[in-house]
């Protein structure tokens, strides 16, 4: 496990990755198991939800139009895909991104690493890839769990492809915010600044996406900068998913990280 | 003889603060160079520029003939580094730490690593976070020496070590030199520098104030000598010598400070019957304090 930087990072994260997965899967399983009870008594909830303003629905239900709590997709949107799963994966990604370059630079361990015969580019890329790998593992496992157990909890109508698409969307959303965090850390080397700004950006863009329609029209275009705008959560028909947008977010994430690695390669280290 | 480290007109600013000012320095291959200065003088900044962690504002550095940038990353195959403030992965055991860095440094002779662990009395099965400062320092030393580098840059190598391990460290440095390595050493412990250093450089407020062979510095340094005569102390004995300062004159003895050659002093006192001469060789600490105060 300790032959390469990426295996060492995985070695460091093995325990936390297990806990993140156990926690996420437990939550998914509990939400799944509650569905049969909600299925037949969802009308009251639906009335309450439908009475909410569209902006509030967008805030809590991931922008999806599918807010029928008695349907499998509606229930999972409200309880999982609207807020919980995106934020679980984003928090995982941000914490690990802030700890990678900026964290090692802040606590001084980067000094021995960069004086080994290994380039800063390789250090950064290996660390970034492990963060992505961790997010892939978490999103794959809960998607797999949902696919395997959905029928056991009366969600036979729900297409597995929809769950895969939604899982992919959550991953891309988390990839975007994690990449911003990683880039800030690599470019500045300041962990607390990176962590603080990343959460401000994430929560700020989430709230902006929910509330921007209350604001004057000329402020609307700012919402194009919120990655939550492009997240459509779980949709039973998957027609709302724009894969071009997801591809653009992925490419921009990689571009931002590439620029930050280039800065990291040449800048003074703050050790 | 090849040059292992070459620093030319090196200047470094942190914002508006000048950390180094036109430093010029050369370390010959297979030499032991001691880089001495108080805290904040610019030692660590110089070392970090030598290792490519910081970029020079002006001037240039080469280590083992190459500029230590990301373009010449292979140069780090031949450099062993011990930081002054050692930070290691707390969650690893000593053995895991050595395995990880040994792999990064392409170590092939693990028997040598084991011998270092044994000589420095390391505790490889314990987690780094449970070790004392001195025991962590031992692992830092093993990591610096483990790949038999051509150039060792050691910042406070004996910091936190007990006297036995300090002696072992001095031995390791001497062995590395005997095996052809160059050692660039920064330390506050003058006694250990005295034991190993061949050339010293004193740095003050970012400027290299003196650099020379240790022997030369010592021979040119102020020497304190007490001469005891069989009869009364002769009067005005050293009046004609500019390099002698009389400190104290007793009935049968005289205490003087001499800078430079002792030859004229010996020639003068040889005309008298001497019962004893007490001469103290200046320590490197005396040299440092003299240069530091005079600059």
Image (cartoon, rainbow, N blue to C red):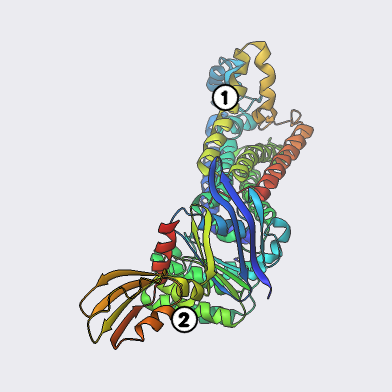
Q: Residue furthest top?
A: A216
Q: Secondary structure at mark 2?
A: helix
What label sits on residue B170 in the rendered view?
none
| Residue B268 appears in view | yes
Q: Is residue A138 above or below residue B140?
A: above
Cα separation, mark 1 vs mark 2, equals 60 Å
Residue lying at 57% horizontally and 24% vertically, measured from the top left? A207
Query: Which residue is disc 1 drawn over?
Result: A207
For the residue pair A148 and B147, the one nearer the viewer reads as: B147
View extreme (right): residue? A244
- Rendered image quadrant of residue B270: bottom left
Chain ID for label 2?
A: B
Q: Nearer the viewer, mark 1 or mark 2?
A: 2
Please, what secondary structure does the residue beneath circle 1 have?
Answer: helix
Position of residue A35 measured from the top left corner of the image (x, y, whole percent): 56, 35
- Where does the image place residue A70, in percent across and percent down from the top left? 59, 27
Q: Count residues near mark 2 (Cα–Cα under 10 Å), then give few for <14, some for 14-19, many for 20+.
A: some
Residue at image location 58% in from the left, 17% down from the top: A50
Q: Is residue A213 left or right of residue A19?
A: right
Is A15 placed left or right of B228 in the picture? right
Front-most of residues A151 and B154 = B154
Q: Residue drawn 66% across and 32% down?
A: A233
Name the image quarter holding the N terminus of chain A: bottom right
Number of labels in the image equals: 2
Residue B119: mark in rendering: 2
Could you tell whether B264 is left or right of A54 in the image?
left
Q: Foreground residue, B289 or A160?
A: B289
**Residues packed near mark 1 inside 10 Å, few (<14), some (14 to 19) or many (20 plus):** some
For disc 1, the chain is A
Q: Is residue B189 visible?
A: no
């Amino acid at each position: 496990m300790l032959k390469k930087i990426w295996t060492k990072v995985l070695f460091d994260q093995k325990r936390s990755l297990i806990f993140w997965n156990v926690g996420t899967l437990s939550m998914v399983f509990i939400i799944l198991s509650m569905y049969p009870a909600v299925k037949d008594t969802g009308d009251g909830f639906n009335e309450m939800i439908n009475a909410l303003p569209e902006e509030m629905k967008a805030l809590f239900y991931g922008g999806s139009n599918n807010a029928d709590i008695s349907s499998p997709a509606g229930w999972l949107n409200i309880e999982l895909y609207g807020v919980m799963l995106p934020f679980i994966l984003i928090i995982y990604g941000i914490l690990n991104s802030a700890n990678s370059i900026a964290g090692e630079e802040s606590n001084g361990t980067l000094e021995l690493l960069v004086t080994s015969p290994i380039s800063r580019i390789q250090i950064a890329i290996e660390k970034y890839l492990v963060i992505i790998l961790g997010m892939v593992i978490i999103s794959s496992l809960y998607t797999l769990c949902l696919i395997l157990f959905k029928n056991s909890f009366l969600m036979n109508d729900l297409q597995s492809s929809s769950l895969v698409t939604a899982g992919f969307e959550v991953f891309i959303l988390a990839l975007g915010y994690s990449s911003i965090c990683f880039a800030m850390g690599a470019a500045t080397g300041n962990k607390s600044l990176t962590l603080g700004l990343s959460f401000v950006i994430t929560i700020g863009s989430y709230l902006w996406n929910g509330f921007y329609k209350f604001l004057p029209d000329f402020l609307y275009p700012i919402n194009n900068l919120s990655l939550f705008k492009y997240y459509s959560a779980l949709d039973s028909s998957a027609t709302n998913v724009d894969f071009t947008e997801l591809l653009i977010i992925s490419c921009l994430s990689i571009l931002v990280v590439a620029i930050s690695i280039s800065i990291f390669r040449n800048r003074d280290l703050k050790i | 003889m090849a040059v292992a480290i070459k620093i030319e007109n090196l200047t470094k600013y942190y914002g508006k603060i000048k950390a180094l000012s036109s430093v010029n320095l050369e370390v010959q291959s297979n030499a032991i160079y001691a880089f001495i200065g108080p805290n904040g003088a610019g030692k660590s900044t110089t070392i970090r520029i030598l290792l490519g962690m910081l970029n020079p504002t002006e001037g240039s550095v080469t280590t083992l003939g190459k500029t230590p940038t990301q373009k010449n990353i292979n140069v780090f195959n031949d450099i062993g580094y011990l930081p002054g403030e050692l930070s290691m992965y707390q969650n690893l055991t000593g053995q895991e730490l050595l395995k990880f860095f040994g792999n990064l440094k392409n170590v092939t002779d693990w028997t040598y690593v084991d011998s270092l662990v044994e000589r420095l009395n390391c505790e490889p099965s314990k987690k780094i976070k449970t070790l004392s400062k001195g025991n962590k320092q031992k692992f830092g030393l093993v990591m610096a020496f483990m790949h038999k580098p051509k150039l060792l840059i050691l910042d406070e190598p004996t910091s936190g070590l007990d006297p036995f391990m300090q002696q072992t460290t001095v031995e390791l440095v001497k062995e590395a030199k005997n095996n052809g390595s160059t050692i660039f050493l920064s330390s506050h412990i003058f006694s250990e520098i005295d034991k190993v250093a061949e050339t010293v450089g004193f740095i003050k407020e970012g400027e290299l104030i003196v650099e020379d062979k240790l022997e030369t510095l010592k021979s040119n340094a102020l020497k304190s000598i007490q001469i005891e005569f069989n009869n009364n102390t002769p009067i005005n004995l050293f009046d004609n010598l500019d390099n002698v300062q009389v400190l104290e004159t007793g009935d049968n003895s005289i205490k003087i400070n001499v800078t430079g050659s002792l030859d004229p002093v010996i020639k003068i006192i040889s005309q008298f019957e001497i019962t004893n001469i007490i001469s103290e060789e200046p320590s490197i600490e005396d040299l440092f304090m003299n240069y530091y105060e005079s600059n």
